[in-house]
Image (tube, helix red, strand yellow):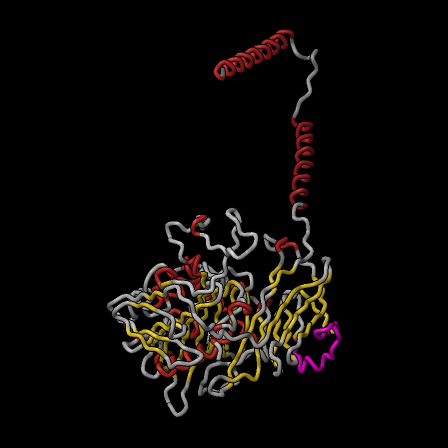
Amino acid sequence: MSRSLLFVLTAALLVLTGAASDYFERLSLTPLPLGSLLASFDFQSNETLQDYQAQNFRYFPRSLGQALKHANTKELHLRFTSGRWDPDTWGARPWDGTKEGGTGVELWAWIEATSEDEAFEKWTTLTQSLSGLFCASLNFIDSTRTTRPVLSFESSGTSREQTADLHFLHGVLPGEVVCTENLTPFLKLLPCKGKAGISSLLDGHKVFDASWQSMSIDVRPMCDAGVAMCRVEISQTIDVVLDIERSKRPRDNPIPRPVPAEQLVCDESKPYHSQDTCYPKDMTDEMAWSVRDIFGRSIAGACPLAGTDAKSVCLNVPHERTVMITQDAQEIKSEAGPLEHRCYQLTPAAGFDMALTQQSINRNPDLGQELLRAERTITGHGAARGGMRTIFTNPSASEFVDFIYFESLPWFMRPFMHTLAAQTTHGQSADVKEIIKDMYYRPAIDRKRGTQIELVMSIPPASTVMLTYDFEKAILRYTEYPPDANRGFNVAPAVIRVLNEVDANGSPKDVYIRTTSLLLPLPTPDFSMPYNVIILTSTVMALAFGSIYNLMVRRFVGVDEVGENKLRRLLQNMSGSVVALKDRLKGKSQKVE
């Protein structure tokens, strides 16, 4: 059993709890190897469909509900992600990657409209509203950054209204920097607004000091079978991977400093160990930490709206691990087995803190592994053409992996689909039809839309497949280059949807994997040339204008035409000016001395 199963069980428990409460929250803490800690914050609110349509909001945030209603948005998924998930060390992704987006900002929604043009107008209204609501650059998601995937995404909501006027749109901003300005509006959407409950731990200095973090907002309609009343559900999650040692640094001394020599833990079994040479010793024990050490504060009690029987904090460690908690909290342990955890019920009046001592654990936790590994890079050299290379690795020794590979390329990146090729592990050319079962391709239109590629692929067990194709780089206009054009242009991460996966109950589930974003260098002009032209033109105009003006205004008079007195007076004035200038310069020099 893997950690992904634990997240599925947690989500199922939240759904069952939602029948009795309209708001619930949960914090799951999972220690990771090499001194890391995965903290997953999950907040979920329900609103009846009648109250939502009448704008009678209780737990659903009014600001977001009005924006969605104004844009005729039936289902919304918004992601803010920074960093890179390390599957080799951290194992499988939390929530099977369904709560994770690509680097930057990713947004997709189902909008009700009578035509594609009307749907795009509503999409523009939605992006501009969310841009102001979350202090992000979502208004830059224009037609060139908007795609309409066919196979990669499916609606996660269940609605009784079956209409053919729903349009699906997807947009990305891979260069968007996620920061505290996005976290503050996120907290304002919560009922307790970061003042109580697990949301009181969300400090921007801690969240964005993480090695990897992802914030998600999901709004979807839900209708239970046999129940006439439907509801609108909003789910907000924050997943962060924190470094325990770095998080323990005090706020008044945030600069890391070298460890004193007497506190170094050295491996003395090395032959080169000496007084001035220290090789770090591998940490075999579980590190000691507490909630106050990691987040800089303790939990400010339970959120009163979450209910008294809510298990607000869950710790995914074996039962043999020693855990110390505050007196008023109640601990509930799971059954003994390969995947053990313990949850805690908090009280609204008292704060909550939890501390784990340094302890040696005989068994390592099962963190699971990704079903598929993917690496995506840009190849080639020069400013005219290049290539895209994606390497897929199937770690399973007996199972095929079927998935959908989705790429959204900018319009100035023109792929040649006839160069699409696949190679196996040993570099042998494979039949593309054996690897690629189906393909959907939508070509780009310059300055109007980007390229959209969706491939249905299958990777054999214990094998690696390299997918390559060539592309051409377009030349942009002078005004289309950003201020940092020499840095390169961002290419959105690829989205991988693994097919034919089931959860612990045998129900089908979605598993998503996203690659890292890329930087595409384009031919860049010399932006100093306009300034050189302006300077040269201004100089020529100044010289020409000055010469012509002097010829037109100046009056030339001969010496013999000037009287003797006038000439003598002119010479005296000139000599007097020279003497006055000498005296002034002499006075300045004396003052300086």
Residue 242 shown left or right of residue 193 in the figure = right
- Tell me where residue 211 appears, x and y as whole percent: 49, 61
> Which of the two residues, 131 or 405, is positioned nearer the viewer here?
405
Residue 508 visible? The answer is yes
Residue 544 shown left or right of residue 308 in the figure = right
> Which of the two residues, 514 or 138, is positioned nearer the viewer here?
514
Choose top left, top right, bottom left or bottom right for residue 338: bottom left
Choose top left, top right, bottom left or bottom right for residue 471: bottom right
Residue 135 visible? The answer is no
- Tell me where residue 241 appears, x and y as whole percent: 46, 65
- Tell me where residue 563 appears, x and y as whole percent: 65, 9
Most extreme residue toward the bottom is 226
Compared to residue 450, the image places residue 46 above or below, namely below
Compared to residue 272, the image places residue 164 above or below, namely below
What span is in magenta?
419-441
Most extreme residue toward the left is 349
Magenta run includes residue 592: no
- Tell me where residue 134 appears, x and y as whole percent: 44, 64
Residue sitting at 49 percent across and 79 percent down?
112
Magenta run includes residue 434: yes
Choose top left, top right, bottom left or bottom right for residue 52: bottom left
Compared to residue 276, the image places residue 315 above or below, namely below
> Which of the two residues, 394 or 403, is positioned nearer the viewer here?
394
> Which of the two residues, 519 or 533, is positioned nearer the viewer here?
519
Residue 343 shown left or right of residue 31 in the figure = left
Residue sitting at 56 percent across and 84 percent down?
500
Count of numbered circles in the view: 0
Compared to residue 454, the image places residue 132 above or below, namely above
Residue sitting at 50 percent across and 81 percent down?
155
